[in-house]
Image: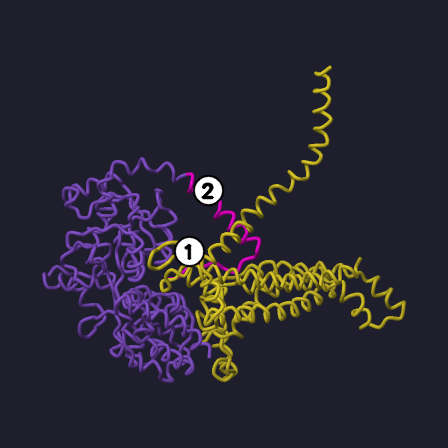
Amino acid sequence: MTNSPLGHSSSLRRLGVCTLAFGLVLTMAACGSSKAASNAGTTNAATAASAADLGGLDALIAAAKKEGQLNVITLPRDWANYGEIIDSFAAKYGIKVNSDNPDGSSQDEINAVKSLKGQDRAPDVLDLGGAFAQSGAKEGLLAPYKVLTYNDLPADAKDANANWYFDYGGYVSIGCDAKKIAVCPQTFADLLKPDYKGKVALNGDPTKSGSAFAGVFAAALANGGAFTNIQPGIDYFSKLKKAGNYIPVESTPATIEKGETPISIDWDYLNAGYVTELQGKGIDWRVVVPADGQYANFYCQAISKSAPHPAAARLWEEYLYSDAGQNLFLKGHARPVRLPAMTTAGSANATDAASLPKVSGAATYPTPDQVDAAKKVLIDNWSKALTG
Amino acid sequence: MTQAVTLTRPGGRAGGWTRRLGPALAVTPFFVFVGLGLVLPTVALAVSAFRRQNPDTLADESTMDNMSTALTGGYRTALLGSLRLAGVCAVLGAVFGVLLAAAVVRSGSPLLRRLTLTASGVLANFGGVPLAFAFIATIGNAGEVTTLVERWFGFSITDDGGFSLYSFTGLTIVYLYFLIPLMVIVVVPALDGLRPQWSEAAANLGARRWQYWRHVGGPVLAPPVLGGALLLFCGALSAFATAQAMVGGTVPLVTLQIANVLSGNVLIGQEGVGAALALDMIVAVGLVMVVYWLVQRRTARWLR
């Protein structure tokens, strides 16, 4: 995701920001001491590893309602339908949802868990990139909890100790403005054609943005690479830049509307989400998962161990992994982790499932170790390969 | 007797005491501000640059790894890239800023002067993603100006002219857009300080034009111009969001690398490297300031 738009600033302004930040730290420290009381009634919920531990789902709902609030973090409203999910959860259980730093990153979430620990406004639940979920579990920041539908989740989609589990995912896709581009590219190989000169963008810098990183990984798969070898992807983008096709602008709906990034490589659920948004502005946005580079990845749900609203946090997870929650992800063009099980059971929304961009075969994912190794290669070589 | 002494002594002492305390009290807010806002963060930064979390034991430990990582490979390239960009921007910004300011001051038109200064005040504070988008929408590949020029003259700035906004050159142009106005603001008062009597006096003594600039105008203007250039250098070195939105990782910049480690979705557990990179930036700016100070001391001696 994007970061907060900090501009260039004069030293005076920086000075102000630092002082302000220090002031906040003091205030937060002052607040921190008086929070123990609010947790006293819900000690059970904080250690509950399943709804059964609390006496069943109804008891969990009652405890969550008593807490009355839930703190979520880095959930953009237009990302995988989170806006509707938050609203429907709040309406269904009468729990106020406080949404903090919607455009933040996984690292921002981990930072918030650490720095706000013990405070009322610390995040309760997290939506993390896989590697961050793993390192968070290792650092003991996450609370193990098994949702009621836990057994539906494939073994490779969850942590052995239930510290985290996949929630929704998608494929790297190529979005294309069919009114500006005569023939929309269908594959990574297509993108190299001279017709697309100065028109191909990623959703950010792959050394920072998770979706752009995935774009490079997908390009690697399309060019003879593997989960263990991302280098062909870097070489591919280097070639794409030398051909003048790749432009390093961070693609957003605004740059698409302006016509600067008429072809954008991004998660399919984001690209598919733009279709409706851009339709109103006269743009015919088409989304295709490139057949030569099918790369899928999931985000992970986790509960913060120091959640100020432990029961509400657990109820949020139950809601997300219920049929209703999973169908809401599906409505947002994301592929919920229980989709295969729900399709078999007939509980998935068939219309939404049918409207997902087409892929062939079952999805395979790199292991976290493979992702880590790929990141290291990318960090070391990306800017070198692209500056040339 | 004793009472009288105690009455007079504190009174007499208090006068001297408060007189000495007065100025100290007056500057206390300044030192508190500088301490909390500048010294404390710098110390925290310096400390974390030499700490890391052991990946296996999760224990905090001292290390030189961060500093050495920050000076090798991609990080080194980024640091050099930032210094090069800041240097080019500072020099170009200072030259064009001084020329523009001199033109406005010499014109003698109060209206032109007020217009320029007001516009400069606004433009010098233009930055971040909005600035990047403004340039993308204007002279990007599908920008308004790019399209118009192609329609009117049949000349494509990007294809025929070989210009790309998404390059070192493009980034320099965008930075100059807010740096030149900043230079104008800084240098106009200094140009006002050049009294016409000085050049008249020099002429009366038989000095030629170049001699006046070499021995009088130049030395008087040197400190403010250098100070302005230093300000531009720091501004260009620390700018971040504009570059992020426009060129991503394709123009290596140290600020982008810091953002990657602090709030990215890709790198984990590299906060120490970020602190080390920031420390490198502080050292770089410190070195530039030493040079500035040496030059200024030389001209200051002359001015005395």
For label 1, the residue is B61
- Point out residue B60 in the picture as x, y percentages from the top left corner: 40, 54
Say whether residue A104 is visible.
no
Q: Quadrant of residue A378?
A: bottom left
Q: Which chain is purple?
A: A
Per the rendered image, the range of residues in magenta is: A1-30
For label 2, the residue is A26
* Residue at left offset 59%, top offset 71%: B88
Q: Decide whether residue A7 is among the magenta residues.
A: yes
- Point out residue A245 in the picture as x, y percentages from the top left corner: 40, 80
Work out whether residue B221 or residue B282 is closer to the camera in this orientation and state it.
Answer: B282
Work out whether residue B212 or residue A366 is closer to the camera in this orientation and state it.
Answer: A366
Figure colour scheme: by chain
Please, which residue is most extreme toward the top here?
B1
Quadrant that contains the N terminus of chain A: bottom left
For chain B, what colour was chosen? yellow
Q: Which mark is residue A76?
A: none
* Residue at left offset 36%, top offset 80%: A236
Few, some or many C-alpha atoms within 10 Å of disc 1 (few <14, some 14-19, many ≥20)? Answer: few
Foreground mark, 2 or 1, reads 1
Say whether residue A164 is visible.
yes
Secondary structure found at label 2: helix
Secondary structure found at label 1: strand
- Point out residue A267 in the picture as x, y percentages from the top left corner: 30, 68
